[in-house]
Amino acid sequence: MVIEQAKGLMARSPGLGMDAAFDQLRCYSRDNNLRLSEVARQIADGRFDVATLSRAPSRGQR
């Protein structure tokens, strides 16, 4: 449930759909060795700047 909330908050950004939001969330979690649910909870609680995710390189862009 919290992952869906985080995806919805992230998808507010222009041009970012739900699938892309999940991809960014998942890549950030993996790249930083964090649990997906914890990053999602921080986003949902407003404790995480979602702009950080859009600046993070995706796995395909390295």
Image (spheres, rainbow, N blue to C red):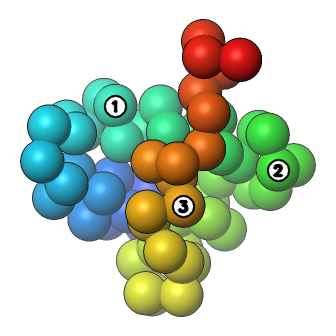
Q: CA distance from mark 2 to mark 1?
A: 18 Å
Q: Provide the residue designation for mark 1.
A: 20
In percent of width and height, residue 39 lies at 62, 64
Q: CA distance from mark 3 to mark 1?
A: 14 Å
| Cβ atoms at labels 2 and 1 below 8 Å apart | no
Quick check: 52 left or right of 59? left
> Is any part of residue 32 visible from this angle?
yes
Quadrant for the C terminus in the image: top right
Kindly indicate the quadrant of the structure image that contains residue 9.
bottom left
Position of 4 relative to 46 (above/below): above
**Tag nearer the camera, 3 or 1:** 3
Q: Provide the residue designation for mark 2.
A: 32
Neighbours of disc 3 within 10 Å: few (<14), some (14-19), many (20+): few
Quadrant for the N terminus in the image: bottom left
Position of 14 relative to 3 (above/below): above
Q: Provide the residue designation for mark 3.
A: 52
Which residue shows up at 59% across the image and 27% down it? 58
Quick check: 6 left or right of 11? right
Quick check: 4 left or right of 47? left
Quick check: 10 left or right of 42? left
Q: CA distance from mark 2 to mark 3?
A: 12 Å
In this orientation, which residue lies closer to the viewer: 22 or 50?
50
Q: Say whether disc 3 or disc 1 marks the residue closer to the N-terminus.
A: 1
In percent of width and height, residue 49 lies at 49, 74
Q: Please name the amino acid that badge 1 sits on.
A: Ala
Q: Say whether disc 2 or disc 3 marks the residue closer to the N-terminus.
A: 2
Which residue shows up at 43% across the image and 63% down it? 51
Q: Please name the amino acid that badge 3 sits on.
A: Thr
Which residue shows up at 41% across the image and 77% down it? 44
